[in-house]
Amino acid sequence: MTTYHCPRDGTRSAVSALTWCCPVCHGPWDLDFTPAPGLALNALSGRVNSLWRYEEILPLSAPSVSLGEGRTPLVPLTDTVSAKLDHLMPTLSFKDRGAVMLAELARRLNPERVVADSSGNAGTSIAAYCARAALPCTVYVPEGTSPKKTEQIRAHGAHLVTVPGDREATALAARAAADEPGSFYASHVFNPYFLHGTKTYVYELWEDLGGRLPDTLAVPVGNGTLLLGAALATAELHALGLIASRPRLIAVQAEAVAPLAAAFHAGADDLLPGAAAAPTLAEGIAIPRPPRARQILAAVRGSGGTFLTVTEDEIRDAQRDLAARGFYVETTGVACWAAVRDGFGQGVDRPGSVVVPLCGAGLKTGMAG
């Protein structure tokens, strides 16, 4: 195994130490990992039909934990916009990409317990993969989490803890539990192995598009795990000489909770003061203070991209529109389609070819009222 390092102050830790954050600044870890050369399109034929097919670029190999995650379809929506159907994952959300990496890592470390916190989808995914790995798991969720998601967490055998208050109160409760000896914090925010799982979203696009990427990747952003995984993948593909240029990253937030969009458009490198939670249909990206904010803002700027926001009415309309096209997607998962379906606007010129993710199945929340 490789080591964790803190991108802010350079502190390092062995992965086996179960230290879930930097002990100096208490920020998220990054991972000391460089993909091995040798990945090529003609080498992928006949490999396992899951994200583990990209063995050269993953920080774990020879896995025991898998539910067949990855390799989701890419389907055109318009002449220029295509959707990657990550709502067809084993637990019905894109979070399976990162959860399988955390569960495989936890299985190797053999902790006394696995702790996770979530607004829903990450929790259902961690619960499922811990069940697959025969690991005891506790998932903390905020009150008001979709009953279908809490039902799914319990069905996988995890212990569910409902926390009064918002998403941040839930995270604080989980982190207190994660500080107990013998706990592995399966954090989709703080643990970088999760990002090395979500980056396979882009590697699949690269494979399915014959060794190229679209001009623009539109990604919903709360804690930013899919966006940072995408940025990681495009940087790796470019460094390996497998793409000539990187796509632009368009980050999408709900207008009701858009702290990153506000910071980006103010020219700030970090969050502005005063960000607060608010009700929104896009519950999965309603994160007022994402711990990786600086990295997210830098990744979008470095790609030449921008932030877009969508209203509650636009989310409702986009969900109905996708359902009319045959895609039953939860309200968070339609945010990017809401942002791009009528043309980008908001200062985005010549987006070219665009891919949006449909991140979670509609069965998890139902249709918006």
Image (cartoon, grey):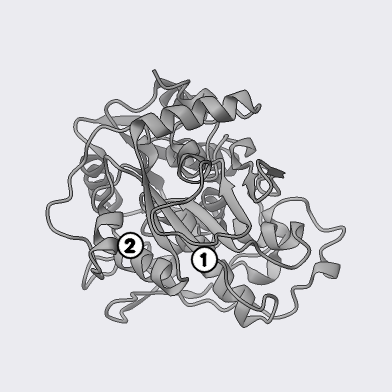
Please tell me how crowded label 1 is: few (under 14), some (14-19), or many (20+) other residues with Cα within 10 Å: many
Can you tell which quarter of the image residue 299 is in? bottom left
Q: Nearer the viewer, residue 136 or 115?
A: 115
* Residue 330 appears in the rendering: no
Provide residue 8's location: percent of width, then percent of height.
28, 77
Residue 66 to residue 194: above or below: above
Please tell me how crowded label 2 is: few (under 14), some (14-19), or many (20+) other residues with Cα within 10 Å: many
Q: Is residue 158 left or right of residue 36?
A: left
Can you tell which quarter of the image residue 316 is in? top left
Q: Residue at x 45, y 42 (%)?
A: 122
Q: Is residue 12 left or right of residue 72?
A: left
Badge count: 2
Reading the image, the residue beneath label 2 is 292
Q: Residue at x 49, y 26 (%)?
A: 364
Reading the image, the residue beneath label 1 is 248
The secondary structure type at the circle numbered 1 is: strand
Provide residue 235's location: percent of width, then percent of height.
55, 75
Q: Residue at x 21, y 73 (%)?
A: 24
The secondary structure type at the circle numbered 2 is: loop
* Three-letter code, disc 1: Arg
Q: Nearer the viewer, residue 98 or 77?
A: 77
